Amino acid sequence: MNAPGAPVEIRYSVCPHDCPSTCALEVERLDARTIGRVYGAEDNSYTAGVICAKVARYAERAHHPDRLTQPLRRRGPKGSGTFEPLSWDAALDATAEALLRAEQRHGAESVWPYYYAGTMGLVMRDGINRLRHAKKYSGQYSTICVTSAWNGFIAGTGRLAGADPREMAKADCVVIWGTNPVHTQVNVMTHAVRARKERGAKIVHVDVYRNATTAQADLAIILRPGTDGAFACAVMHVLFRDGLADRDYLARYTDAPGELEAHLRTRTPQWASRITGVPVAEIEAFARLVGSTPKTYFRLGYGFSRVRNGPVNMHAALSIAAVTGAWQHEGGGAFHNNGAIYHWDRSLIEGLDALDRSVRVLDQSRIGPVLTGDRDALKGGPPVDALFIQNTNPMMVAPDHNLVKRGFAREDLFVCVHEQFLTETAQMADIVLPATMFLEHDDLYQGGGHQHIMLGPKVVEPPEGCRSNHELICALAKRLGAAHPGFDMSPRELIDWTLLHSGWRGVADLERERWFDVQPAFEDAHYLKGFAWPDGKFRFKPDWAAVKPHDFGPQGATLPVLPDHYDVIEEANDAMPFRLATSPARGFLNSTFTETPTSAALEKRPTALVHPADAARLGIGDGARVRLGNDRGTTVVHAKLFDGLRQGVVVVEGIWPNAAFEEGVGINVLTGADPIGPVGGAAFHDSRIWVRAA
Ligand code: SF4
């Protein structure tokens, strides 16, 4: 403990959570095991001293009395939540035996290591793949978050990278599209608001409901979920019609401007208004603003891609910046994610040298169909008989919850979950192992929403009994007879090797400097030497076959050739007349932070935002209990009357635990696990439902 009156010791770290901001942190270290307040690093040019409230009070999570600190073995029936403690050695032996048993029965592909982004650290998140590849266990196609958005962006630019996000502060107009950064990546607002303060820039928000980000915007476009492509097409129609398209830029930098212009002639604001619900005057006003403001920065988010036409919508929105030529200007262009600028050599962390491409790859979002024996989801291969899970909580976050639950309830399925809390997924496990948090181990991070490589060094000792993901993977590998040099290295050695083999300086320099700013040169970030396709052109006509990493979801023939409204969404019908979006809550981050009392208190209870006109028709009052349902299931929430969305649209914020709902069934009972075409992904904001008074 610091001596009374002594300055509090500050250590540096990085936020590990599934958020593009990847904030540089300053952490009060009170003693060898205790942290105090957490702050954003002032001198990191993207974080700029600002972090979200849920991470500022991280001590509440790190020192939570419910943290897991000892291995547990299931005692009662599956899901009963009854466990007995056992030693780490016994737990590792039991896990290894179960994985080997599954392998003997149906082959190595019957084991499915399953993970996601509970931590974004490269070593602790991705090391599970080293074990997977060394053992030839089933692969994971990670579709639950980014696939739809990333591939939609790459379809246009050829590369997952864009204009420096700090340039937002130099824009005259910032379009924040399909994301609610006040809830999900607060630093976008830092730079957008700076542009308004310093340059009088306009902030525009495009979303499916008015929220905390809309409250800071000068212009709001509120559309029906899954109709962004129609809106984007009408905007481009106006740009061509009114002479606001940059024809010189189009001729030099794009593939088919003439075909696009001809195609858009019928995509009028009137046409789009019928699809989107956005009044014609608002479409015209938006088009005039972005068409007459060369320095318009399009900050394209993830939310609007989580619909069945998501990649097509992302590509359509991105196409606007190519029509106006915004890319040419500092403060203009588009950005979604900077994944491509880091060019990591992941071979040691992920064991890519051991990857056998003949091993089947299963779609992460289809865990429900996979566990319940759907032959298509299993790729015609053996059943999954053993799951080894790190960094994710599919019982809460995966779509089509009833199927997921049925799968986890299988008596012949072995499940090991390595976790920080007894999550709803851990409650379904046979073996639960306690995991460290980010301040208790070393890791390497990249800023998805910016341009920094960052080191998160260990700051405090973990609670007695917790082990890091890396420690667990290495210990299991020994018991399973899996060999790879990465299993004998420390996290720091892995980080150093990865940095050096990726063309960066090593871990000692990174530790001294805290981060490397690896922003590409202006002309590269703005594609002034050409886009990243062989002909250097932005593609209005995507070659989806060149984009998609795997064959998942509807393919080929039905995809629009040019930007369009791709009419494959789960459109409302007479029986299910509402469209549901499950947007992120401010206090939670996916299922993380649902365990901290402050976040739960802020979010209050699962709530459906219902338009007052719809509520009146249904006889539903403010605060009434309502049942939401569709072909997949039903759940009960409380209604809140809210006129900040289109009639016929319902929004339920947050991934609340199933247990927080009256009947123990959460919102993902309503979402579907059918893949988004043509790249895969889960359509979390694209469910038709009915609404009734409960
Ligand atoms: S804004 Fe995102 S990256 Fe920054 S502290 Fe919050 S969750 Fe972490």
Image (cartoon, rainbow, N blue to C red):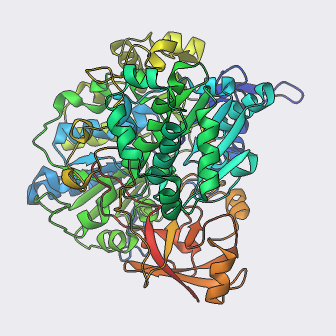
The quadrant the C terminus occupies is bottom right
Image quarter for residue 34?
top right
Judging depth in this view, the residue of 120 and 324 nearest the camera is 324
Judging depth in this view, the residue of 632 and 565 nearest the camera is 565
Task: State left or right for residue 411 relative to residue 322.
Answer: left
Task: State left or right for residue 25 relative to residue 677.
Answer: right
Residue in the image at 72% along x and 25% along y: 10
Residue in the image at 65% along x and 49% along y: 183
As drawn, 259 above or below 92:
above
Q: Position of residue 428 (x, y in %)?
A: 39, 67
The quadrant the N terminus occupies is top right
As drawn, 554 above or below 124:
below
Q: Position of residue 404 (x, y in %)?
A: 34, 68
Task: State left or right for residue 326 relative to residue 11.
Answer: left
Residue in the image at 60% along x and 83% along y: 626
The reply to whether residue 342 is visible in this rendering is: yes
Q: Position of residue 188 (x, y in %)?
A: 64, 36
Image quarter for residue 675?
bottom left
Q: Residue furthest right?
A: 5
Q: Position of residue 376 (x, y in %)?
A: 16, 62
Judging depth in this view, the residue of 248 and 653 nearest the camera is 248
The reply to whether residue 442 is visible in this rendering is: no
Task: State left or right for residue 476 relative to residue 692.
Answer: left
For ligand 1, give the image quadrant: top right
